Image (spheres, helix red, strand yellow):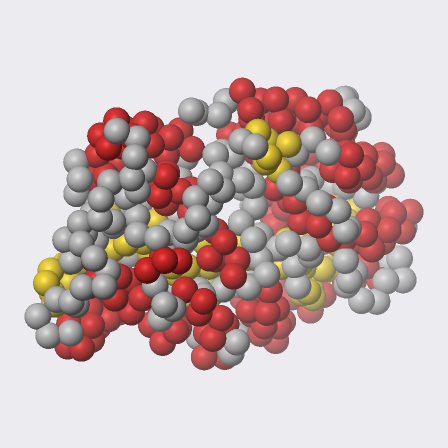
């Protein structure tokens, strides 16, 4: 199972436009009080999770909730992976948004702006149980509340080829990104490539943060990722490229999914980032001879957070029941059971992440167990990269410009300015 991608900003913006037209631009009144009696029928919608692996789990969760609350009936529906955005648009436009619904942060933001989701900061007493980064992921500029419970989460870790590091006398993974850059200089002098990829502007967020700087990314509705700190990092990459420290494939595949991992698996570069289940699920399968040489360490800076959540419709006629079920399906015991099935992902509560042995698969390789531990430790500090409205098309264009700068065709300043201008010119109002 892959983490669901953040919904396209163009679609999300169209939802906002349509719903604003339907509601007059204001927040619609709630269909019922979340303080009411827990009774009646509700509909629960997931995204491509009704299958042999997950169906028994959801059936058990629903049965347990219905047993606990006499008179409640939960109708579970599931939408296919393709076209989910359009389906949510149709449901919201027609006033048929499910009572409890699986939403990624970007789409939840647009629904929240027009009052379609319950404010959990105001109405839920258990919001403090969830990881801080996940809660922040469903809290938006210009809105005071939080609009979904963090449900299943992912992040990135660092992976190192220790045999290659050893060629420059480096015996332990670098402790931070600044040290990584310095070690990359040493490795380049020894004829070793360190960089399996070049940074996009989302990666620049954690790079700048780990070096002690600030990278606001967005301010007053404008993208502002063209900063001196970011330029210096790109300039370091350009110097490393000239010295042989950046894999040529990093430039050739700029913007391609998994380009960095594919390069690392060749055994010719010393560093990559990847998800927590990379050792057992990818490396052991695709490059098993590298296993003895690879060591994992925690992510640098504000490690990226990949996030799915559960929101509650403000139009629910049984809002108290909908809120209670959303809390139930995302509580610690149920989240633990869910991520046991969703290998490589992590639960959305602090308590669940405190002991990953309760949900992690038995590691086939010792370093996989280390990866799981590091991921759980950083889950609360991880943050969603980018900013609301920043699309993959914007990110890809900016990365392509950064590739030109690393190759020496344009300056770092020009690359970031062009990427920033493109993003601001293509925001869908």
Identity of the residue drawn at 25% across and 66% down = 324
Identity of the residue drawn at 68% across and 24% down = 417
Identity of the residue drawn at 68% across and 42% down = 215
Relative to 120, does residue 396 appear above or below in the rendering?
above
* Residue 231 in sight here: yes
Quadrant assignment, res 28: top left
Say which of 362 and 423 sits in front.
423
Q: In what quadrant of the picture does the C terminus appear?
A: top left
Q: In what quadrant of the picture does the N terminus appear?
A: bottom left
Say which of 134 and 306 sits in front.
134
Q: Is residue 317 left or right of residue 202?
A: left
Q: Looking at the picture, how far across and down is residue 127, in whole percent?
A: 41, 64
Say which of 149 and 114 sits in front.
114
Q: Looking at the picture, how far across and down is residue 72, in whole percent?
A: 12, 67
Q: Looking at the picture, how far across and down is residue 217, in whole percent?
A: 62, 38
Quadrant assignment, res 111: top left
* Residue 102 in sight here: no
Q: Looking at the picture, how far across and down is residue 346, in whole percent?
A: 47, 65
Relative to 304, does residue 67 appear above or below in the rendering?
below
Identity of the residue drawn at 50% across and 54% down = 136
Count every numbered label the image shows and give the total.
0
């Amino acid at each position: 199972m892959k983490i669901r991608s953040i919904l396209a900003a163009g679609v999300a913006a169209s939802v906002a436009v349509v719903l604003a037209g339907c509601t007059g631009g204001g927040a619609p009144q709630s269909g019922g009080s979340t303080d009411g009696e827990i009774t009646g029928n509700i509909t629960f919608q997931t995204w491509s999770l009704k299958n042999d692996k997950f169906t028994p789990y959801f059936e058990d969760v629903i049965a347990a909730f219905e047993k606990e609350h006499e008179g409640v009936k939960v109708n579970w529906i599931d939408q296919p992976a393709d076209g989910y955005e359009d389906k949510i648009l149709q449901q919201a436009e027609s006033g048929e948004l499910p009572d409890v619904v699986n939403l990624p942060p970007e789409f939840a933001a647009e629904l929240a702006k027009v009052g379609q989701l319950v404010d959990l900061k105001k109405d839920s007493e258990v919001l403090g149980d969830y990881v801080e980064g996940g809660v922040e992921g469903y809290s938006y500029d210009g809105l005071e509340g939080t609009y979904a419970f963090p449900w299943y989460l992912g992040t990135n870790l660092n992976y190192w080829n220790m045999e290659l590091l050893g060629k420059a006398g480096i015996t332990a993974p670098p402790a931070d990104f600044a040290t990584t850059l310095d070690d990359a200089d040493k490795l380049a002098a020894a004829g070793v490539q360190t960089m399996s990829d070049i940074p996009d502007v989302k990666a620049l967020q954690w790079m700048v943060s780990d070096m002690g700087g600030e990278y606001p990314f967005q301010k007053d509705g404008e993208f502002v990722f063209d900063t001196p700190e970011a330029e210096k990092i790109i300039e370091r990459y350009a110097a490393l490229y000239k010295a042989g420290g950046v894999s040529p494939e990093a430039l050739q595949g700029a913007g391609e999914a998994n380009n960095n991992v594919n390069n690392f698996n060749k055994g010719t570069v010393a560093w990559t980032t990847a998800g927590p289940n990379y050792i057992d699920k990818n490396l052991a399968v695709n490059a098993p001879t590298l296993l003895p040489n690879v060591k994992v360490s925690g992510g640098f800076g504000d490690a990226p957070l990949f996030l799915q959540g559960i929101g509650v419709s403000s139009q629910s006629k049984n809002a108290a029941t909908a809120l209670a079920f959303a809390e139930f399906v995302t509580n610690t015991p149920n989240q633990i059971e869910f991520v046991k099935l969703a290998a490589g992902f992590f639960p959305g509560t602090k308590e669940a992440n405190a002991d990953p042995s309760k949900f992690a698969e038995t590691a086939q390789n010792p370093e996989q167990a280390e990866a799981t531990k590091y991921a759980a430790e950083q889950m609360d500090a991880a943050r969603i990269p980018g900013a609301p409205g920043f699309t993959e098309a914007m990110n890809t264009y900016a990365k392509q410009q950064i590739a030109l700068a690393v190759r020496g065709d344009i300056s770092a300043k020009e690359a970031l300015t062009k990427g920033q201008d493109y993003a601001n010119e293509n925001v869908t109002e």
